[in-house]
C-alpha cells in the first residue's frame, strides 16, 4: 500500500504522482500507454484501447473540492478521443479517479463550466466546478464506469 499522506507533497509532486497513477489505471484495464516527452498541447499521454482506438489524456490532480480548468486553446471539445483524467486526493486514502470525455463540455452544467472571460485578462477556459453540491454529478465519470464503455 502506498504512503497516502498527500498533504506532504507539493503541487508538482502531486501532479507527477497523479500522472503515473493514471497511467497505471489505464494499464490495469489492458490499455497500452504511450508517454510524450513534452506536454505542450495540454495532453499528458496517449492510450490505445483493446479495440485499437487512441485516446488523448490530460491529467489533473486536486486535494479538495475546488475549481480545475483547461485553456480552450489546448482543449478540443469536438475531439471524441480526448479525455480528462481527474484524481481526487484525500489523506489516508488512494485517489478517486474519474474520466471525463472532452465532448461533454459541449453541454455545460453546474459541474462542467464554459468560461470566455470577455474583456478580461484571463484566457477562455473549460472547467470543473468541484463543489460538495456538484460531487454527485461527477459520479457517472468514475473511471471504471467509463472504461467499460470504451
Image: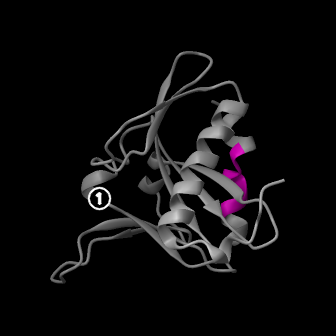
Question: Could you tell me which residue is drawn at 71 percent across and 53 percent down?
Answer: 140
Label 1: few (<14), some (14–19) or many (≥20) C-alpha neighbours in 10 Å:
some
Render colour scheme: one colour
Q: Can residue 75 be seen in this view?
A: yes
Q: Can residue 134 be seen in this view?
A: no
122 in relation to 124, above or below: below
**What are the residue bounds of the magenta stretch?**
138-143
Q: In this view, does 58 lie to the left or right of 93?
A: left
Is residue 38 on the magenta stretch? no
Which element carries disc 1, helix, strand or loop?
helix
Where's residue 42, x and y in %?
Answer: 34, 50
The residue pinned by badge 1 equals: 72
Quadrant where the C terminus sits is top right
Q: Eyeballing the image, is 10 above or below 104?
A: below
Give above or below for 147 relative to 63.
above
**Relative to the observer, which residue lies in front, 108 or 85?**
85
Quarter of the image for residue 91 reads bottom right
Q: Residue at x 58, y 23 (%)?
A: 49
Amino acid at each position: 500500500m502506498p504512503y497516502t499522506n498527500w498533504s506532504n507533497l507539493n503541487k508538482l509532486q502531486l501532479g507527477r504522482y497523479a500522472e503515473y497513477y493514471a497511467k497505471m489505471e489505464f494499464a490495469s484495464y489492458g490499455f497500452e500507454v504511450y508517454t510524450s516527452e513534452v506536454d505542450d498541447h495540454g495532453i499528458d499521454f496517449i492510450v490505445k484501447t483493446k479495440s485499437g482506438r487512441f485516446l488523448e489524456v490530460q491529467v489533473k490532480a486536486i486535494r479538495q473540492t475546488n475549481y480545475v480548468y483547461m485553456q480552450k486553446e489546448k482543449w478540443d471539445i469536438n475531439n471524441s478521443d480526448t479525455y480528462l483524467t481527474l484524481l481526487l486526493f484525500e489523506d489516508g486514502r488512494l485517489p478517486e479517479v474519474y474520466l471525463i470525455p472532452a465532448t461533454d463540455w459541449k453541454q455545460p452544467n453546474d459541474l462542467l463550466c464554459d468560461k470566455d472571460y470577455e474583456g478580461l485578462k484571463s484566457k477562455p477556459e473549460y472547467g470543473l466546478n468541484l463543489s460538495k453540491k456538484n460531487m454527485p454529478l461527477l459520479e457517472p465519470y468514475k473511471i471504471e464506469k467509463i472504461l467499460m464503455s470504451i
